[in-house]
Amino acid sequence: MNRLKSLFLLPLLLCAADLSAGAPASLRVPEGASVAELRLPDGFRITAELALTPEQQERGLMFRRRLPADRGMLFVFSDPGVKYFWMKNTFIDLDMVFLDSGLKIVRIFHRVPRSTADQPESEVARASSPASCVLELAGGTARAHRLQPGMTLKISFPKPPPRPAARPAKK
C-alpha cells in the first residue's frame, strides 16, 4: 500500500519541484490591480478577475450563471504547491488551467462539471495539481484555443482608473 501511495505522490512531487525551478515563488501583481489581461499562445485575449485574498479565492466563480468565453478568473497564490479546487455552488462548467509562477501551463482540467443546488458534497467535482496560479475559464475555452501543458501565457495589468480627488467639505 505504501509503495502504491509513493507511486501516486512521485509525479506530484516532481511537478512541484519543477514549479520552483527558475521561476519566482509567486506572480507579481501590481498594487490595486483587480483584473489582468491574459494572452493565450494563439493571441486570444482573456480578461480575468483576480482572486488574490483567501476570501476571494474561496468564493471564486461560485453562484455565477454565465461566463463569456473571453472572461475568467485568475487565482494567484503566495506560495506554490498543490492547489485544491472544487465546484460547490459553481453553476457553470469550467476549464481549470494550473500554471507555474511564470504562467507556464502545468495541467488542464477540461469542462469540470458544474454543481447543482441539491448535490451532495461527496459528488461535487474536484481538481487538484501543483500550481502557483490557476486560471478558470468557461468550459470548452481551453480546447477551443488548443491550450496544452508546457505552453506559456502572457499577462498584463490594466492601469486602475485614477481615484477622484477629495472634495472640500461644504460649509
Image: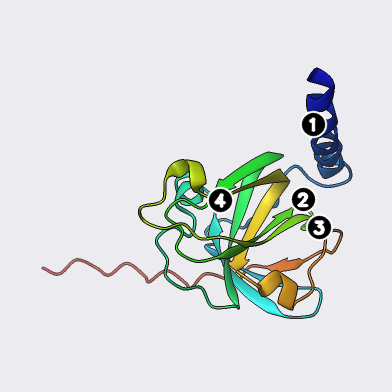
Give the answer, above or below, for where 104 lies relative to 71: above
Of labels 1 and 4, earlier in sequence is 1
Which residue shows up at 52% across the image and 69% down it?
Answer: 160
Q: In the figure, is residue 96 to the left or right of 120?
A: right
Q: Position of residue 65 (x, y in %)?
A: 42, 70
Task: Report which residue position mark 1 lands on.
Answer: 9
Kind of residue at disc 2: Asp
Of labels 3 and 4, the one closer to you: 4
Q: Secondary structure at mark 4?
A: loop
Q: Position of residue 50 (x, y in %)?
A: 55, 59
Q: Residues within 10 Å of mark 1 (few under 14, many from 20)?
A: few
Give the answer, above or below, for where 93 lies relative to 134: below
Q: Secondary structure at mark 2?
A: loop
In three-dimensional space, the C-alpha distance between marks 1 and 3, rounded to whole angstroms, equals 21 Å
Task: Report which residue position mark 2 lands on.
Answer: 100
Q: Secondary structure at mark 1?
A: helix
Of labels 2 and 4, the one closer to you: 4
Task: Report which residue position mark 4 lands on.
Answer: 125
Of labels 3 and 4, earlier in sequence is 3
**Residues at circles 2 and 4 in contact by the CB criterion of under 8 Å:** no
Q: Quadrant of the N terminus?
A: top right
Give the answer, above or below, for where 97 lies relative to 81: below
Nearer to me, 57 or 13: 13
Q: Position of residue 136 (x, y in %)?
A: 60, 61
Of labels 1 and 3, earlier in sequence is 1
Q: Residues within 10 Å of mark 4 (few under 14, many from 20)?
A: some
Which residue shows up at 72% across the image and 46% down it?
Answer: 131
Q: Secondary structure at mark 3?
A: loop
Task: Report which residue position mark 3 lands on.
Answer: 104
Outermost residue on the bottom side: it is 43
